[in-house]
Image: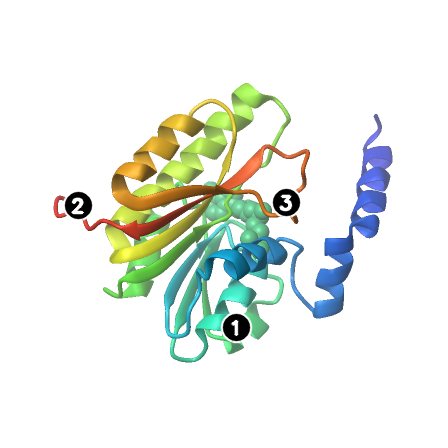
Amino acid sequence: MSHSKSSTRWLARNNADPYVREARAQGLPSRAAFKLEEIHQRDRLLRKGMTVVDLGAAPGGWSQVAAGVVGESGRVFALDLLPLPKQDELAKLGVEFIQGDFREAVIAEQLLAALAGRRVDLLLSDMSPNLCGIPSVDQPRAMHLAELADEFAMRVLNPGASMLVKVFQGSGFDAFHKQLQSHFGTVTIRKPKSSRPESREVYLLARNFKSLSFV
Ligand SMILES: C[S@@+](CC[C@H](N)C(=O)[O-])C[C@H]1O[C@@H](n2cnc3c(N)ncnc32)[C@H](O)[C@@H]1O
């Protein structure tokens, strides 16, 4: 299919998507915002005053939702490869943004430096690689990002904290699920209605982080 035909199809699907229309109407940067809202409505993840890290934050939907709940007494540290289109507006809501590739140790160190010793109450990761459609290529890339989010969580989470991380069902999923179960009190799978049903994307919600003395 030609590039312009697939773009036209994407545009048509996007314009027909009720979540895209609702995001525009509510001034939210992305339809992804509804995934976090839905999970928050059910699981009460966010609270006033929390320190939140948002990995893979662009274009900024989750950060905007999180900043709205944690309020002025809380903090949101967002990171993405790409710039945040509404960075100034989000900064006014208290979102601190770092642009860079989370696979690079130096970028994770920058985020640690920004946290300045503050422990994190909720770590969010909606990071997703550029999917090429070949599972044997996409799946390890996606799992690697989830692994990095978990490694970072081990370093910064408060005992009792939570993590919400995007993963794709497929190779490595069960092992990662088990790994989280060893670090957290409970781990549940969430597939919000706003997550496209045809996508293998799901979210693992890990709660009650057990403090590990050896990290
Ligand atoms: C589905 S989008 C996130 C949407 C976001 N949660 C929102 O509400 O607007 C996935 C993001 O992961 C980011 N990403 C992918 N690989 C990354 C990496 N290695 N480091 C940082 N961000 C990455 C992409 O740039 C993309 O913006």
- Give the quadrant of the N terminus: top right
Is 21 on the left or on the right of 127, as rendered?
right
Q: Is residue 114 visible?
A: yes
Residue 121 at x, y percent in the picture: 33, 61
Is residue 74 or residue 190 the one in the foreground?
190
* Residue at image location 74% in from the left, 61% down from the top: 22
Residue pointed to by mark 3: 195
Q: Do tag 1 and tag 2 residues touch (Cβ < 8 Å)?
A: no
Q: Nearer the viewer, mark 1 or mark 2?
A: 1
Q: Which mark is residue 215?
A: 2
Q: Are there few (<14), some (14-19), or many (20+) residues within 10 Å of tag 2?
A: few
Q: Do tag 1 and tag 3 residues touch (Cβ < 8 Å)?
A: no
* Residue at image location 61% in from the left, 67% down from the top: 86
Give the vertical position of 160 relative to 147 (above or below).
Answer: below
Is residue 27 or residue 44 the one in the foreground?
44
Element under disc 3: loop
Q: How many marks?
A: 3
Mark nearer the N terminus (1 vs 3): 1
Q: Which mark is residue 68?
A: 1
Residue 71 at x, y percent in the picture: 46, 77
Residue 3 at x, y percent in the picture: 81, 33
Is 208 on the left or on the right of 205, as rendered?
left
**Looking at mark 2, is its residue's CB closer than 8 Å to ligand 1?**
no
The quadrant holding residue 201 is top right
Mark nearer the N terminus (3 vs 2): 3
Element under disc 1: helix
Q: Are there few (<14), some (14-19), or many (20+) residues within 10 Å of tag 3?
A: some
Q: Amino acid at mark 2?
A: Val
